[in-house]
Amino acid sequence: MPHDQPEPAAGEITCREVAAWTSAYIDQHLDDAAKVRMALHLAACAGCDAYVRQIAAVRDLLPLLPGVGAEPAQRDRLRQAFAASQKRPPTET
């Protein structure tokens, strides 16, 4: 998971925002301004760049597993469930 850096300058995004936007970035669902902000952050933050690359690799490899072929409706439900889980604070186990 990406780490938090010092306060970003105006217009820059934080590592937490990168983590929250990763799926949308990989799936090309961000507007042009957000894509640029992500790209600039990834160019400057090796931890976030590695994180985004790992998530992209998992996303690209999942369909290759036997029996894992999510229909578009299933992908949308999974994406919504993941987004909802990111809004809740983590629970202690």
Image: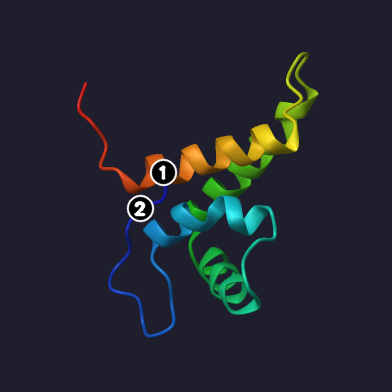
Q: In which quarter of the image is residue 88?
A: top left
- Counting from the top left corner in percent of width and height, residue 39 is at 60, 69
Residue lying at the far left of the rendered structure? 92
Q: Residue 3 carries which label?
A: 2
Q: In this view, does 49 lie above or below 63?
A: below
Circle 1: is it few (<14), some (14-19), or many (20+) Cα within 10 Å? few
Q: Can residue 3 be seen in this view?
A: yes
For label 1, the SS is helix
Q: Is residue 54 visible?
A: no
**In the displayed structure, does residue 24 sit left or right of residue 62?**
left
Nearer the observer, 90 or 83 = 83
Nearer the observer, 4 or 68 = 68
- Counting from the top left corner in percent of width and height, residue 54 is at 60, 41
Q: How is the image coloured?
A: rainbow
- Counting from the top left corner in percent of width and height, residue 70 is at 72, 28
Q: Which residue is drawn at 38% across and 66% down?
A: 14
User: Mark 1 or mark 2, which is nearer to you?
Assistant: 1
Q: Residue at x 63, y 73 (%)?
A: 31
Quarter of the image for the N terminus: give it: top left
- Three-letter code for the amino acid on which mark 2 is drawn: His
Q: How far apart are marks 1 and 2 (CA)?
A: 21 Å
Q: Residue 4 carries which label?
A: none
For label 2, the SS is loop
Quarter of the image for the C terminus: give it: top left
Q: Name the residue under label 1.
A: 84
Residue lying at the far bottom of the rendered structure? 10
Q: Is residue 67 above or below residue 18?
A: above
Q: Which residue is drawn at 56% across and 73% down?
A: 34
- Three-letter code for the amino acid on which mark 1 is drawn: Ala
Q: Quadrant of residue 76?
A: top right
